[in-house]
Structure formats: structure tokens, C-alpha cells
Amino acid sequence: MQKELTIIIPTKNEEKYLGTLLNSLIDQDYPCMAATRVLVADAGSTDGTRRLAESFKGRLDLEVIPGGTPSVGRNNGAHLATTPYILFIDADIFVRRTMIRRTLAYLKHYGWHAATTNILCKTGIFLDQAFYFTLNTTARLMGFGTGMFLLFERQKFLELGGFDARILYAEDVFLTKQLPRNRFGHVPGAVLAPNRRFRHMGYSRLGWLWLKTVFNLYNDRFYYRDHSYWQYRVSD
């Protein structure tokens, strides 16, 4: 069966979450999953992330490659890919069984350059659900996506120059907003994420930063500023 998809997962100290994601990939009903290359772009994890990833060899066509920031890790994987499509997934995501097959089908059917889906919180309180609902609604209305689950035509991704490694916050928004609105799609359904982003950064701080992002969506200078985002992005 011809290979058409490469999956790229940036990691750093993701031992707690990565196994759940990789098991959800094994469980996909996508018929080419066994032949799909999975690249774990690890940024020098000091926990058991690399060992855990390598334990899935044989169940997935998996390889651990050098990473860095999420942008660097994703770009490293994309440059190694030879397939028509590349799928970026964050290490703490759970992918429901039909999602990869359906996302590829939507992208091909509608001629999109890229596609994403909704993000739902699998843990936490009502406020977590409300935050993700706001994110999903804003992304659909304004035509952008996040790197938590993002499928791209590889050729278009390379034409756009990939993720800008100089941007440390909202690099995924910056990339996807460059696509024509009618060539970027949102697939019905959802993948699941934990609520650690809110716990680490705080609801008010993250909400204010997100609001500023929406209002500065087409202000390129905003993305290159230091938003102190990574000082809150620690593993748990």
C-alpha cells in the first residue's frame, strides 16, 4: 500500500502523555496506519520520553529524531517526510479512532491545503471546556488552526516556509492564517487534550493572551514579540 502520510510529534519530557497518543494512533481505523511513518522530534528529554517512544517500534513505524522548540521539531520532521501529507500532533493529544482517516478524506474531497479539528478537554472543570469552546469557535470563524492537530499538504507547507522558528507563541496561527480561507478546513469531531495549559499559565493570563492574539491576528509584529509563553510551558 502506497505511503501518503507522515506524522510528526514534537516532544520534551512528555513521558506522562506520549503513550496515550501513540496507543491512539495504533487504534486508528485509517487503513494505511501500519505503513505510516511516525517521527517523534525530541528536544533532549531528561525523563523517559525517548525510551517510551522507542518501545512502540514494531507497533508503529516510529523513529525518534532531533527536535527543539515545537517549530523546530515539526520542521525537522517535515524535511524528512517524503509523503504528500504531513500531520502534526502535540504529544499530549488523544486522537479518536476515525479522526485521521476522516481528516484526510475531507482534505482531499474539498481540495484544502490544510485542515484541523476541534480540541476538547478530557479532564478538568467547566472553565476548561469553555476555554476550548472559545478557541474552537474563534478558529473556525477566523480561519486558522493550532498545531495540536494539524494536517498539511507537504508541498504547500514547504512553499510557506514551514513554522517560523523565531516565533515562540502562536506560530501555528501565524502559519495557517497565510492560507486562503477556502483552502483551510475544520473537520467535524474533536481530538482530546488535558487542561495543563490552563493550570500552568492560569486562566486569566492565558485568556488575555488569547484575546490579544485574536485582535492582532494580522499584525505580524505581534508574533515576534516575547510573550513569556514558554516560562509557563513545563511538563507535569
Image: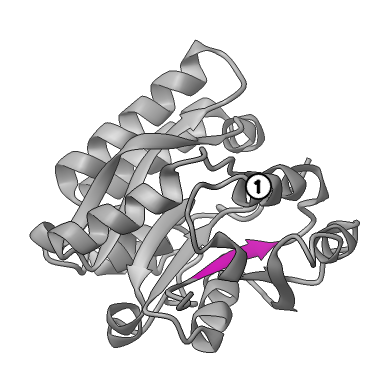
Q: Which residue is drawn at 76% across and 47% down?
A: 19
Task: Please indicate whether residue 78 sits to the left or right of residue 105 in the image.
Answer: right
Quadrant in the picture for residue 133: top left
Magenta part of the chain: 6-11
Residue wearing tag 1: 21
Seen as rendered, the residue at the extreme front is: 1
Task: Please indicate whether residue 20 sits to the left or right of residue 133 in the image.
Answer: right
Q: Is residue 230 visible?
A: yes
Q: Which residue is drawn at 66% across and 52% down?
A: 231
| 70 is higher (above) or lower (below) than 117 | below
Q: Residue 182: within the magenta? A: no
In the rendered image, residue 78, in percent from the top left (x then y), is placed at 49, 80
What's the magenta bit mostly, secondary-structure-wise?
strand
Q: Which residue is drawn at 44% across and 81% down?
A: 83
| 94 is higher (above) or lower (below) than 151 | above
Amino acid type shown at disc 1: Leu
Q: Can residue 232 be seen in this view?
A: no
Closest to the observer, 127 or 213: 127
Q: Quarter of the image containing the C terminus?
A: top right
Mark 1 lies on a secondary structure that is helix
Q: Which residue is drawn at 61% across and 51% down?
A: 25
